[in-house]
Amino acid sequence: MAVAKLHAGGGMPMPMRLLPSPMTHRTLPRIASFAPRRHTIVALAAKRSPKRLKYSTPRFTKEGELVYIEVDPFGADSWKLQPVIELLKQGAVGVIPTDTVYAIVCDCKNHSAVERLRRIKKIESSKPLSILCRSLRDIDTFTMGFPRGDGHGHANVFRAVKQCLPGPYTFILTASKELPKQCVGYGTTSVKYASRKNVGVRISDDPLCQAILHEMDSPLISTSVKGPKENEWMIDPTAIGEIYGPEGLDFLVDGGVRVAEPSTIVDMTGPYPKVIRQGKGPILPWMVVEDNDSPLRQDLMASGT
């Protein structure tokens, strides 16, 4: 309030004569300590150099531990996410909640961050990754888009897809040249990735995830936080920190315990939309399901969230 009073009387001669008085000097420390939380956040972002992120050991706290932020699952205090946004822009790797399971994320345009994410999750460089997008515009920019009116019964596929997003689906699309090379799987001995450069795309319907994405300049690389067993997802933030913290995470956003239900994966690169993993998203009439006897096969994409 003292600051407001000083500005309010800035054009009057009386306050100018009072500025050197002892009483005015005594109020200055109170003004300086009025918003310590905001100044702390700015200092956190300013002191960190992107070059330091090349090291696998977290360097964002004095003790070298990961930054842990607990927030309301519905986003009531999403302002707490500002330090996470600043760290991501610098090249940090961390865990955030989505509308399905927790995900390890980083800026898709930061090469060293992507390599660290692969190392933390133990994902081979030949395997494609998924991206969390802000909107359909991001999908149009970083992929070749959804099938539109190809004359083979897919005239309404794009319209149908728009009804699913944001939501618990991962759509596999052909990547565009805008997506950095290290985000997609290039030609390998595996036939599955030899002929295409594909990427899974998601628009999460989670308020915390959306709050972070809307402050980013590009999509986030995303891979689900899985347990030691196959097809086992970690849903407790405390357990995630204990397991992945020592591996090199920089931050963890605690949005509460989640349900262990990953997204439904739909391959859009073939002649028809094919479901390759049934998850939280319901199977819709325009989707084709194959191998119904094994909906959760062991060879599903490890990076799907």
Image: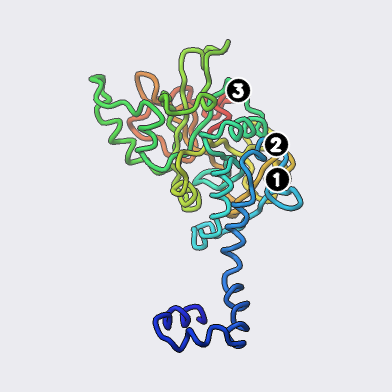
Q: Where 35 falls versus 140 (above or below)?
A: below
Q: Earlier in the sequence, mark 2 or mark 3?
A: 2
The image shows residue 107, relative to residue 197, as above or below, that is below
When asked about the image quadrant of residue 119, the answer is top right
**Residue 44's image quarter?**
bottom right
Disc 2 crowd, CA 10 A, few/some/many (<14, 14-19, 20+): few
The amino acid pointed to by label 3 is Ser
Helix, strand or loop status at disc 2: loop
Q: Is 181 placed left or right of 244 in the picture?
A: left
Q: Are marks 2 and 1 in contact (CB under 8 Å)?
A: yes
Label 1 secondary element? loop
Report the side of 21 relative to 212 (left or right). Answer: right
Task: Classify residue 175 as left or right of residue 26.
Answer: left
Query: With respect to residue 209, does 3 lie above or below?
Result: below
Structural distance between the alpha carbons of marks 2 and 3: 18 Å
Q: Position of residue 4 (x, y in %)?
A: 46, 79
Kind of residue indicated by mark 1: Arg
Image coords of residue 292 (percent x, y) = 48, 26
Q: Residue at x 50, y 81 (%)?
A: 1
Q: Which residue is mark 3?
A: 125
Question: Would residue 246 be visible to someone looking at this image?
Answer: yes
Q: Which mark is residue 59?
A: 1
Element under disc 3: loop
